[in-house]
Amino acid sequence: MFIVSNIINAVAVVLHMLVSAYIFVVLAACVISWFRVSPYHPAVRVLNQLTEPVFFFIRRKLPFARIGQVDLSPLILIIALELVDLIVVRSIQQVAMGL
């Protein structure tokens, strides 16, 4: 039974790492948006491809995500990702510990 517990715990750890990595991607996209960088630069294109679909979804579903010129969609996304990490990943870890 400990093998199943270890597998479930490993899944939780990988999910935690993926959520943390995506938070860093969102933060990098925010920092790059503050500077004049060519939108054709490969790093900028990759960051936009990874973040813009999610930002667009948040902007479309939550009209308060944009206040004037301030876009709050990255902040909303980071809060949602942290909630997923705290609730879902920790719940999976607790299930693994209970086995």
Image (cartoon, rainbow, N blue to C red):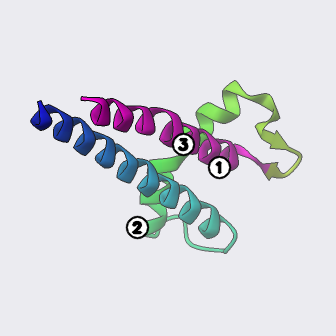
Residue under circle 2? 42
Q: Nearer the viewer, mark 3 or mark 1?
A: 3
- x, y (%) of residue 51? 51, 48
Residue under circle 1? 74
Q: Are marks 2 and 3 in contact (CB under 8 Å)?
A: no
Residue 84 lies within the magenta run? yes
Q: Secondary structure at mark 1?
A: helix
Apparent side of residue 90 relative to residue 11 in the rendered image (left or right): right
Q: From the viewer's perspective, is residue 41 above or below residue 80?
A: below
Category of crowding for the residue at label 1, using alpha-carbon neighbours closer than 10 angstroms: few (below 14), some (14–19), many (at least 20)? many
Of pointers 2 and 3, the one earlier in the residue sequence? 2
Q: Nearer the viewer, mark 2 or mark 3?
A: 3
Task: Locate residue 64: give its quadrant.
Answer: top right
> Which span is picked out in magenta?
71-99
Identify which amino acid the numbered label 3 is placed on.
Leu
Q: Residue furthest right?
A: 68
- x, y (%) of residue 55? 60, 41
Q: Secondary structure at mark 2?
A: helix
* Quadrant, the C terminus: top left
Residue under circle 3? 81
Residue 14 lies within the magenta run? no
Q: Are marks 1 and 2 in contact (CB under 8 Å)?
A: no
Identify which amino acid the numbered label 2 is placed on.
Pro
Q: Residue at left 73%, top 28%?
A: 62
* Quadrant, the N terminus: top left
